[in-house]
Amino acid sequence: MLIDSNLIIYATQPPYTQLRSWLVNYATHYSAISRLETLGYHRLGEAEKQAIIAILDNLDVLMINKVTLEIAVALRQQRKMSVGDALIAATCLDSDLPLATANIKDFEWIEGLVIHNPLELGS
């Protein structure tokens, strides 16, 4: 399962201990764009930075390739969405992986994309 950037950020915050456990058991990958989205924030504190790195170091990174880019372009041609979301969804589709995200509404319209929200019961 590929983890969205928002869950990586949530997992660094104290109220999300169950999410951290879920990540250990179910998350396997992240998109390269998530590294930029999570670590590229200009006001990121050192403790949060180290917590994000610890999470990312336990997952496999999926690089953006030509096929991923073409899928992302096609998605953005269909509907307004951020570059990051388009690349994350495209990475999932190209790699045949489900997406774990807290932002279901951003992705639910994408045909063929399996989505889970680990913050909701039963996901």
Image (spheres, grey):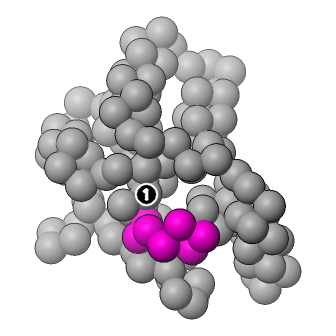
On the image, numbered disc 1 is attached to which residue?
2
Classify the position of the N terminus by image quarter: bottom left
- Tell me which residue sits at (52%, 42%) in the image: 61
How packed is label 1: few (under 14 Cα within 10 Å), some, or many (20 or more)?
many
Task: State yes or no: residue 96 in magenta.
Answer: yes
Which stretch is magenta? 93-99
Name the amino acid, label 1: Leu
- Tell me which residue sits at (42%, 16%) in the image: 50
Instruction: Classify residue 119 as left or right of residue 65.
Output: left
Task: State yes or no: residue 36 in magenta.
Answer: no
Task: Work out whether 54 lies above or below 104.
Answer: above
Instruction: Classify residue 13 as left or right of residue 65.
Output: left
The percent position of residue 70, horizontal first and vertical second, equals: 81, 71
Out of 62 and 37, give the one closest to the viewer: 62
User: How many labels, in total?
Assistant: 1
Residue 58 visible here: yes
Task: Work out whether 13 lies above or below 46.
Answer: below
- Tell me which residue sits at (36%, 23%) in the image: 54
The percent position of residue 9, horizontal first and vertical second, equals: 43, 38
Q: Quadrant of residue 36?
A: top right
Q: Regarding mark 1 in the picture, which secondary structure is present there?
A: strand
Task: Work out whether 43 lies above or below 77.
Answer: above
Task: Work out whether 70 lies above or below 17.
Answer: below
The percent position of residue 30, horizontal first and vertical second, equals: 49, 48
- Tell me which residue sits at (53%, 66%) in the image: 95
